[in-house]
């Protein structure tokens, strides 16, 4: 009977782990998410650049109300400084995506990337997100004027004439919005990786 009053050392060793159950959280492979997002960033920036630079359209328009003779006029992205800035910013983001894609490949091949690399990627992703967002806003403002015009200052809308050109511009801006969102998600992934390591 005495053996039932006091648990044996063998039984107590079994009950100690049971009193403190370990909780296993599902592991999330953040580095594969990072790699996928950088591939999406590359694809969206390249496509946006190609769509923008191929947006040329030539139409017959009346230049002067006094001389109502239609003249062939071409609409190109390089006729607007805002669109030139847009293409330049996306080109920088595209090159950045290639460089960081290689860094992400290297981090996946390692067991544990350094905190310094994660911190640098988070900072650079944030800077690139600001650059792409500013270029997208600039191009979007010019595109809105082209689509709606501004009767207060006498700016006429051109999308009724250059419909293909405007469709290209709109599609390129939509892809740039996607690229900006991807960059924000990359910042969140990098900072969350650092947060998990600091716990």
Image: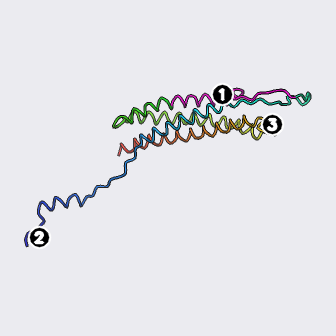
Q: Residue furthest bottom?
A: 1
Q: Residue furthest right?
A: 66
Mark pair 2, 3: CA separation:
95 Å
Mark pair 1, 3: CA separation:
21 Å
Quarter placement of the N terminus: bottom left
**Label 2 CA crowd tier, 10 Å (few <14, some 14–19, many 20+):** few
Q: Secondary structure at mark 2?
A: helix
**Coordinates of residue 182 in the picture (x, y in percent):** 53, 40
The residue positioned 23% from the left and 60% from the top of the image is 18
Q: Is residue 120 magenta?
A: no
Q: Earlier in the sequence, mark 1 or mark 2?
A: 2
Coloring scheme of the render? rainbow
Q: Which secondary structure type mostly characterizes the magenta part of the structure?
A: helix
Q: For the magenta stretch, what is the residue range?
A: 70-96
Mark pair 1, 2: CA separation:
85 Å
**Label 1 CA crowd tier, 10 Å (few <14, some 14–19, many 20+):** some
Q: Which mark is residue 156?
A: 3
**Label 3 CA crowd tier, 10 Å (few <14, some 14–19, many 20+):** few
Which residue in the protein does label 1 denote? 84
The residue positioned 43% from the left and 31% from the top of the image is 103
**Quarter of image, res 170:** top right
Specify whether 192 is left or right of 6: right
The residue positioned 60% from the left and 34% from the top of the image is 47
Q: Earlier in the sequence, mark 1 or mark 3?
A: 1
Q: Earlier in the sequence, mark 2 or mark 3?
A: 2
**Quarter of image, res 114:** top left
Which residue in the protein does label 2 denote? 5
Q: Secondary structure at mark 3?
A: loop
**Coordinates of residue 112 in the picture (x, y in percent):** 34, 37
Specify whether 57 is left or right of 41: right
With respect to residue 19, does 134 lie above or below? above
Q: Which mark is residue 198?
A: none
């Amino acid at each position: 009977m005495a053996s039932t009053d006091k648990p044996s050392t063998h039984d107590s060793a079994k009950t100690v782990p049971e009193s403190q159950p370990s909780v296993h959280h599902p592991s999330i492979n953040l580095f594969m998410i990072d790699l996928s997002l950088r591939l999406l960033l590359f694809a969206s920036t390249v496509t946006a650049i190609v769509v923008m630079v191929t947006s040329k359209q030539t139409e017959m328009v009346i230049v002067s109300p006094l001389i109502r003779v239609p003249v062939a006029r071409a609409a190109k992205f390089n006729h607007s400084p805002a669109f030139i800035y847009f293409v330049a910013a996306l080109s920088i983001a595209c090159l950045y995506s290639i460089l960081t894609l290689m860094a992400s490949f290297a981090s996946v091949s390692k067991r544990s990337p350094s905190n310094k690399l994660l911190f640098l990627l988070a900072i650079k992703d944030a800077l690139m997100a600001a650059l792409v967002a500013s270029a997208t806003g600039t191009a979007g403002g010019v595109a809105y004027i082209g689509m709606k015009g501004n009767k207060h200052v006498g700016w006429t809308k051109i999308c009724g004439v250059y419909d293909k050109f405007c469709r290209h511009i709109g599609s390129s801006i939509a892809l740039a919005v996607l690229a900006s969102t991807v960059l924000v998600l990359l910042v969140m992934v990098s900072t969350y990786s650092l947060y998990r390591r600091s716990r």
